[in-house]
Each structure stands twice: as structure tokens, then as C-alpha cells.
Image (spheres, rainbow, N blue to C red):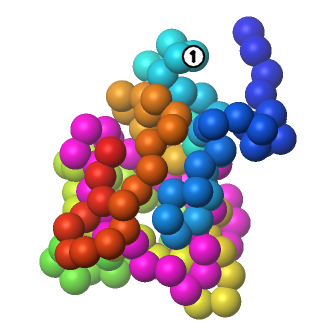
């Protein structure tokens, strides 16, 4: 058993500025649990084109608001108590709220190494 806090992660290389916010990589590959758990903040007013080609991801909103949009133009509002699941390596837009950050618990399978960062420039979706 072990215990790890956001503050523990902030003084390690597993606190990541990912381009449109921050990610505390609380549980990573080195922990040998078979999945990752991250505390993810998506800054207000940001838009990120993402696609996880090597991971499946589920995101549960614990605060704030935002939205996720699939590549067919379907927009799904995200607020506290809502989960969205990228079960097919879905390419998507992730947006922070208009006046507030979106705060998520993000689960990745297989687990992240913990230091991955997005590249959010150009027309291609950023991926790990």
C-alpha cells in the first residue's frame, strides 16, 4: 500500500504542463497497477485537439465545466458528476469552460509513464 498527494506529485517530474492545463500523474506505469490516474485541469477558454492512439481514457469531472466534441460535430457538455469515455482511441476536441477551468480525474489504460506532454500546434491531433 502507498499514499500519494497532489503536493507529492508537484515536486516530481510527474507534474506536467500538458499544453492547455496541468496534470498530476498520481498513479503511473512504475506503480504496476495496470492503469494510470491523473488529476487533470483544463484551463478556461482553451481548445485542444487530442487523440490517444496508444491508450484508452475515461475522464470523470469533479469540478468546473467544459465540453468534449467528437469528429462528427457532436458536442457534449461536461460538468461535475459527468464521465466521458474515449473507448475507440477517439479523436476529439476538449474545451475548458467559458469562465472556469474543467477539473477531471483521468484514467488511462495502459498506464502512462508519467512524463508525456502534448504538442498542441498544427492541425494534427496531439497524442501519446
Q: Is residue 55 magenta?
A: yes
Residue hosting label 1:
31
Residue 126 vs 66, above or below: the answer is above
Callout 1 environment at 10 Å: few (<14), some (14 to 19), or many (20+)?
few
| Label 1 SS | helix
Quadrant placement of the C terminus: top left
Residues in magenta, as a range: 39-67
Q: Kindly identify the residue that appears in the image at 68 percent across and 82 percent down.
A: 100
Does residue 63 sit above or below 105 in this rendering? below
What residue is shown at x 61% (from left), y 81% (from top)?
Answer: 44
Q: Nearer the viewer, residue 83 or 96?
A: 96
Q: Position of residue 27 (x, y in %)?
A: 60, 29
Location of residue 26 by image quarter: top right
- Is the N terminus in the top left, top right, bottom left or bottom right quadrant? top right
Total numbered badges shown on the rendered structure: 1
Q: Is residue 62 above or below residue 71?
A: above
Image-quadrant location for residue 14? top right
Q: Is residue 54 magenta?
A: yes
Q: Is residue 14 visible?
A: yes
| Residue 29 position in % (x across, y down) | 48, 22
Q: Residue at x 67, y 59 (%)?
A: 62
Residue ranking furthest to the bottom: 98
Which residue is pictured at 43% across the width and 38% down the height?
Answer: 108
Farthest top residue?
1
- The answer to whether one can see residue 104 in this image is no
| Residue 70: image location, x then y, percent | 25, 72
Please identify the dominant SS of the magenta region: strand
* Horizontal side, residue 36 vs residue 43: left or right: left
Farthest left residue in view? 72
Taking 49 as reference, is 10 left or right?
right
Picture coordinates of residue 90, whole percent (x, y): 23, 57
Amino acid at each position: 500500500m502507498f499514499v500519494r498527494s497532489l503536493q507529492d506529485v508537484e515536486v516530481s517530474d510527474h507534474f506536467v504542463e500538458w499544453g492547455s492545463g496541468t496534470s498530476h500523474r498520481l498513479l503511473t506505469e512504475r506503480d504496476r497497477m495496470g492503469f494510470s490516474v491523473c488529476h487533470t485541469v483544463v484551463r478556461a477558454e482553451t481548445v485542444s485537439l487530442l487523440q490517444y492512439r496508444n491508450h484508452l481514457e475515461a475522464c470523470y469531472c469533479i469540478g468546473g465545466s467544459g465540453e468534449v466534441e467528437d469528429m462528427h460535430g457532436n458536442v457534449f457538455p461536461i460538468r461535475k458528476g459527468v464521465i466521458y469515455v474515449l473507448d475507440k482511441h477517439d479523436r476529439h476536441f476538449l474545451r475548458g469552460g467559458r469562465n472556469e477551468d474543467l477539473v477531471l480525474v483521468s484514467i488511462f489504460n495502459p498506464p502512462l509513464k508519467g512524463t508525456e506532454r502534448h504538442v498542441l500546434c498544427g492541425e494534427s491531433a496531439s497524442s501519446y
